[in-house]
Amino acid sequence: MKLEDQWHEIEAGLPEDWSTVALSLMIAEDDRADRAALILAPFTPGRRGSWFRFQVRREQDPVRVLRRLDEEGARGLLDLVETRTAPPPKPAEVERKRPLVEQWKELVGRLPQDWSDIYAEVELESTDFVQRGALLLSPLNPALYGGPTTLRFRVARVAGYGTAPEMSRRCLERLDEEHITGTLRVLHVLSATNPVSTQGPVWRMAGRSV
C-alpha cells in the first residue's frame, strides 16, 4: 500500500478532536533511507537507520511529503505511535474572552420581562484592570466587593436606586473599547418593584446592606 494511502487510513481512525499525532515510518530499502530523510525534513524526524519517527500537527498536511516518497518509489510501513487531543477550554476562560456587552445582552435576555432591579457584578480578568475599570464604570457607582477584581453594581430599570440599563450597557462598552475583559454575572433580580418612601430594594450580603 502506498504511504499516502496508509496515512489516509490512519487519519480516518483518529478522534475528531485530535491535535497532534506521532508517526513512525520504516523504509523497506536501506539505500532509499537517506533520500527519505531529505523529503521528511519539514517534519524534523528522528532517525535510526531506515526507521523514522516524526510528529504531525492537525494544521499540517503530510500528504504532499508522503506522495513525494511514493513518486520516488520509496516503499515502507507507516504506523501511528501516539495521538494527542486538544484540551477543552475552561468555561471561565471562554466567557472572559467574550465582550462584556455580549454577556450583558445575553443575561438581560434571560431576565423576566417585568424585571425592575438587578444586583450584578463584573469579575475582571486581571488586577491591572481594577483601577481603570472602576473609573470607566463610575456611573454605576461600583463597589469592590466579592473578590480583589470584582466590582458590583445595581441597575434600576424603572425607578429607584441604581443606574439605568442603557447607561449600564454603555459603561460595559467602554470596558470593551479598552480591551478590559472579565465575566459578568447577575446575582439578584427583582420584578415589578414599587418603592414607597425608599430609593429601592435592599439586599443583605454577608450581613451587609447593598
Image: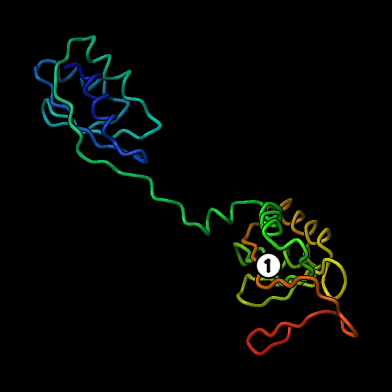
**Image-quadrant location for residue 32:** top left
Hey, what amino acid is under mark 1? Answer: Val
Tell me what residue is drawn at x 75 percent, y 61 percent.
Answer: 113
**Image-quadrant location for residue 126:** bottom right
50 w.r.t. 179: above or below: above
> In the rendering, at what x and y percent does residue 170 appear?
80, 56
* Left or right for 12, reference 139: left
> In the rendering, at what x and y percent does residue 9 appear?
24, 26
Tell me what residue is drawn at x 34 percent, y 44 percent.
Answer: 85
* Left or right for 124, reference 48: right
State the residue lying farthest toward the right.
197
Tell me what residue is drawn at x 23 percent, y 41 percent.
Answer: 82
Question: Which residue in the protein does label 1 denote?
Answer: 130
SS type, badge 1: helix
In this view, the residue in front, 58 or 106, is 106
Mark 1 crowdedness (10 Å alpha carbons): few <14, some 14-19, many ≥20: some
> In the rendering, at what x and y percent does residue 200 appear?
83, 79
128 w.r.t. 27: above or below: below
State how many labels appear. 1
In this view, the residue in front, 178 or 199, is 199
**Image-quadrant location for residue 166:** bottom right
Quarter of the figure with the C terminus: bottom right
> In the rendering, at what x and y percent does residue 171 appear?
78, 59
* Left or right for 74, reference 12: left
Quarter of the figure with the N terminus: top left
What's the colour scheme?
rainbow
* Left or right for 163, reference 19: right
